[in-house]
Amino acid sequence: MKNVLIGLASAFAIALPAFAPPAFAQAPAAPAAAPPREWIDKDTGHRVVRLSDEPGSSSLYFNYNGYAPQGDKLVIATPKGLSTIELATRKLAPLVEENGKFLFVGRKTRSAYYIVEEGKAKVVKAVDIDSKKVRVVAKFDRGDIQTINADETLLGGVVVTKPEIETRPDGMLKRDNRFDQAAYAANGPDGKPLSFAEAKEVRLNERLESKIPMEMFVIDTRTGEKRVVHAATDWLNHLQFSPTDPNLLMFCHEGPWHKVDRLWLLRTDQADAKPVKIHTRTMNMEIAGHEWFSADGKTVWYDLQTPRGEDFWVAGYEIATGKRTWYHVERNAWSVHFNSSPDGKLFAGDGGDSEMVAHAPDGKWLYLMHPRGIPDVAGIHAPDSEHLIRPGVIDAEKLVNMSAHDYRLEPNVNFTPDGKWLVFRSNMHGANHVYAVELAKAASAK
């Protein structure tokens, strides 16, 4: 099956950082009052500020870095291009105006990377966030760039290796209207129409079972050399370089989460390196996904459900030792995406609506999450306890009431480098904007 769509961000964990906003995120046609610049959430007592000025602005996907290495500036996408936000003053300034897609900010240099199309070529550019000087980083003909490594020497991407089916502008797969979100439809084994969510799973499975050849590649930013690091007929996606190890790459096998082994690590500096599976399923309908690296690069964290839609965990895999930690999450606190603080002591979640996998009756909140380990009783532990999963629970604190937010736009929370705010995107006031909520309660609410 050749003509299938793989561009649904909520299912495929691909960012939505295009300079132009997605269709559902556009500003209202009729003139509307500007959203408030700042307020105290009456339900939580936390201060919320609007960082963006232009309707249709967006912060990055939850696991992409948008901050300068020194932690002083945030880069966001606007309908005109890219802008910087000085975090100390919230001063907003245009950075570059060009029709392209925002990728990420480097972890070594003060460069924001984006991609444009020039004729038949795809061009990755970097703009210095202080001088605004733009340089060309790499050119290639097909595929999609998804990540950059810790020292900014390698770009990582993925491509379908059959050019005859690679007809979409992003180098992936030709669009078929059956796979648009609004057109999902499928019948079950009994011939009756399935719900939207189940029909979506059918279409994802059809794409997976097509076994379309794909490759993961890296491009050397110093020489432009491109080389393949992994090839498969698995559906390869969600590439993430470690924030600290320049040669450690994480990726996923996409598809219905209860069917695929999703989480993998691969070393790019070893020609014969084999992918290492991070999580092995132990029960039917167990799912794991929306993975990310801790800020120190030592742990891979992910959303784990045992089984899907019933029991929820933030799970961790320690890369050096293989040790595992699972923090239990209550249904309402389950989130489309979780994230971890720079010091590794806290988590955050962006909540979810009642139609999502947790079917939470009261899940439309942004959460600050305090992990708490479960100790041995009276200091007595099992003989093999060091080899067992370290259990814990999440104590979730509500930060922002998201009842007016349409979760077709995922908030994608991330911590500011100082660990004092969460940045997120929202359409709670109509058009998309970038916001931040202060983790400490406002003085007036204490």
Image (tube, helix red, strand yellow):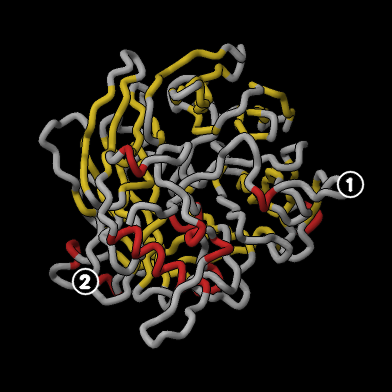
Q: Residue 221 placed where, x, y %?
A: 36, 19
What kind of element bears circle 2? loop
Q: Residue 182 placed where, x, y %?
A: 58, 63
Q: CA distance from mark 1 to mark 2?
A: 64 Å
Residue located beneath label 2 in the image:
381
Of 206 and 414, the residue lying toward us = 206
Mark 1 or mark 2: name the one nearer the start of the chain.
Answer: 1
Of 72 and 249, the residue lying toward us = 249
Measuring 27% from the left and 70% from the top, which residue is drawn there? 379
Q: How busy is the neighbourhood of tag 2: few (under 14 within 10 Å), some, or many (20 plus)?
A: few
Query: Viewed as shown, does residue 365 lie left or right of 333?
Result: right
Which corner quadrant of the image does residue 133 belong to?
Answer: top right
The quarter of the picture where the N terminus appears is bottom left
Residue located beneath label 1 in the image:
31
- Residue 378 numbered tag: none
Measuring 48% from the left and 59% from the top, which residue is drawn there? 179
Mark 2 residue type: His
Query: Viewed as shown, does residue 397 lie left or right of 388?
Result: right
Of 20 and 2, the residue lying toward us = 2
For residue 209, above or below residue 94: below
